[in-house]
Image (cartoon, coloured by chain):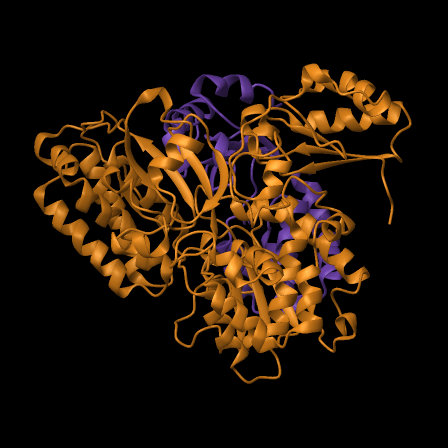
Chain colours: A orange, B purple
Amino acid sequence: MKTYRSMVLVSNDPQSMVQGAQKVFETLQAEVKKYNLEDEISITMASDIGRMDISPVVVIYPEAIVYGPINKEDVPYLVEEHLYKGRIAANLQAPKKALSGPIAWLTAREGSLPAEQRIVLERAGLIDPESIDDYIIHDGYQALGKVLSDLKPEEVVAILKDSGLRGRGGAGFPTGMKWSFVAGTENDKKYVVCNADESEPGTFKDRLIIEGDPHAIIEAMIIASYAVGADEGYIYVRGEYELAQARLRTAIQQAKEYGMLGENIFGSGHSFELHVHAGAGAYICGEETALLESIEGKRGEPRPRPPYPTTNGLWDKPTLINNVETLANIPPIIRHGAAWFKSFGTPSSPGTKVYTILGNVNQTGLIEVAMGITLREVISIYGKGMKDSISFKLAQTGGSSGSIIPASLQDTPMDYDSYSRAGVSLGSGALLICNEQTCVVDLAKVLLQFFRFESCGKCNPCRIGNIRALQTLDRISQGLGTEQDIATLQSISKNLFEMSNCGLGQTAGTPIRDILTHFRAEVDAHIKLKVCPAGVCEMSGQPILYQ
Amino acid sequence: MASQTEIADNITEIVQSALEYYGKKEEELIPILAKVNRDLGFLPQEALEEISGELKIPKSKVKSVASFYHMFSTKPLGRHVIKFCENAPCHVAGGREVWNALQQATNLKVGETSADGKWSLLTTSCLGLCAVGPVMIIDEDVFGNLTADMIPDILSRYE
C-alpha cells in the first residue's frame, strides 16, 4: 500500500465542474509537481456534494480543512501555503457551517458536511474513490467479512427482511423479500444485477454514489451473491456515465487483487465474478427486464411479466436486480444491524433517502435525509426557500415513476406509505420544485415529450398513446383545445395505465391524470377562456406537428 | 473526427479492433457498436454488415440494435454535435428559451445536420447534471446554467 503525506480532494459535482473544478484539479497537479511533492500528495476528484454553496471545494486531509470556492488562480498560493509550508491558508478557508445531524461523526467533522443523515453517502467526498485501502480504512469490506465468517445466507436475508429496507429505484418493493425469492429458487446458475441505468430526469444520486464510493456497491453485490447463491454479477451503468464506469472498473480490479472477488473468496468457498456493462442511451433499459435484454446484447424491449426475473432473469436464470442506492444501504445494515437502521425514518419506510433538489429554489443539489421529511421542510431547509420568493405550486418527483405533488401535500411525510395513501409517489427521489409561474399544461407536455421520445415502440398503448396525448396537450397549449380533449386525455391515460406492457407505459399517463386531478381549473382556462393563467403557453393558434 | 474517405478506409480496421477487444460474442454487440460508433463518429452500413458477419448475427438484428439506442447514429453527423437536454428539470430552469435560441442560431431543427457539415443539433436524455440546468453538450464540452444570450458566444468558439 502506498502512503501519502496528504490527500487532496477536489469536488466534481456538476456545479463545481461548470465553475472550473477540472482546471483547479489540473493546476493542483502542476503546482504539486513544481515542488516535487507528487510522491507525497495524492490528488483526486471526488463527488464532494456537501457544500454546493462554496463550490468548487478543495478538502485537504489529514487536517480535513475545507477550502472553497477555489478557482485556478488560488491554487499556487494554496499549494505553497498548505502543502509546501504546512500552514493553513486561512483566507481561502470555507466558512464553517452549523451542524445539527444526529450522527456523532458528523459533528466531529464540523464544517465539512451539512446537517443530513448520511448512510448511503457516508463516505462520498470523504475518501479517495479510486483507493480500496481508503475504503477499507473507513469500515469498508467489514460487512463482507462478517457475512462470510459469521452468517449463513438465510441469516443475511433475515437481517435484511427485519431491517424493512425497500427498493430505492422507485417502486419501493421490500428488498429482503426480493432476496428471499431468488434465494428460494433452485438453480445451479444465478445472477446478481445492479441497476445503475439511472435515467429518470432530474435524478443523479446513483451517479454520485458510484463516483464517490464505488466499493460500497461491489461489497453489497458480493454480500447479495452469497445470500442468494449467485456466482456471477453485472453492473449495468448507463452509457452517459463514463466516469462512473471507469471508477467501477478500477474498483473491481482492485477488489480482485485483494481477493474480494473471484474464486473462493477469503477461503469461504463462495465465488463471485463481477462485470460492468455500459448502456448506450435508452431510458427504457432502466426497466429491469429491458435491462436484462440489453445485457444479452439485444434491443432494450421489456419482457412480459410474469415470469419475474427472480425466477427467469438473465439468460433465463434466477436473477436478483437491485438499484444502486438500495445496494449502498446493505453494508451499513449488516455492520450495525436491523434495529439501528430502523431508528431512522418512519416505521413503514425505515432509513434515509437521497433526493436531488432542482428547479425554482435558491439552492439546488443533493441531500440524504431520513424518510418522513416533508416537502415544505426540504424546500425551506435544504432548498433555502423559493427563488425570488415566488410561491410554491407543485413538485414533480422524476420520470416515469414519479408524480406531480400539489402544494396541498407539502406537509405530507415523504415515505412510501404516506405518499401512496395520498395517491402520489416518491419516484426516484428527484424533487423538481416549480413555482407559480409554471404552467401545468406546458409541464405535462414536456413530460409527455419525454415518454414519446423514450417509448421503445413495442406495444401500442405507449407508442401511439403518448404521441396522441402530446398532440392533444399541444392543441390545448396553442388555444385550440375543446371540451372533448379532456375526455380524450382521460381515455388515453386510462389505456396507458391498464394496457401497457411495462412500467414506462403504465406510468406515462401519470402527468395527465395528476394535472386533471389537481389543476383542472387551470386546464379548463386554456380550453374555455383560451388563456394560460401562468402566461407560459403560446396560444398561437398553430399546432406543432409532432411525429 | 475523420473525413468521409478516411472513414471508408478505416472501417475494417476499426471494426476488427473492436471485435478483438470485446471478443466475438453476441452479448458484446452493444459494447462493440459503442466502440465503433465512438471511433468513426457513426455506424456506417458497411460496419454493421461486417459486425453481422463476424458475430454470425442476422444483419437485420444488428441494424435493429444499432437504431434502438440513442447514443448510436446510423447517419454521419456534423463536425460538432450539439446535444441539448430538454427534460423537465432543464425546461423549468429556463431551457425553453435556450432551446429556441439554439435552433435560431444554428438554423436547424432537432435531428438535422447543417448543409456545410458543421453542426448537428440533437436532444439528449437527462445527463444527470440537473443542478446546473439548462445543460447542453457540444462534442465533449459541458455547458451549464445556460441562458439564451450565451448561445452565440458559445457557438462562435467552434471552428
| Figure label count | 0
Q: Position of residue A161 (x, y in %)?
A: 48, 69
- Comparing A526 with A334, the one in front is A334
Q: Is residue A398 visible?
A: yes
B34 relative position to A481: left or right: right
Q: Position of residue A213 (x, y in %)?
A: 65, 48
- Comparing A507 with A343, the one in front is A343
Q: In the displayed structure, would residue B34 be above or below residue A436?
A: below
Q: In the displayed structure, would residue A363 be above or below residue A276?
A: above
A196 relative position to A268: left or right: left
Q: Position of residue A454 (x, y in %)?
A: 41, 51
- Comparing A199 with A204, the one in front is A204
Q: In the displayed structure, would residue A14 be above or below residue B150?
A: below
- Tell me where residue A59 sits by quadrant: top right
Residue at the (36%, 55%) spot, across then down: A416
Residue at the (55%, 56%) spot, across then down: A329
- Tell me where residue A105 sits by quadrant: top right
Residue at the (71%, 25%) spot, across then down: A24
Quarter containing the N terminus of chain B: top right
A460 relative position to B27: left or right: left
Q: Is residue A240 visible?
A: no
Q: In the displayed structure, would residue A397 be above or below residue A318?
A: above
Quarter containing the C terminus of chain B: top right
Q: Position of residue A181 (x, y in %)?
A: 48, 76
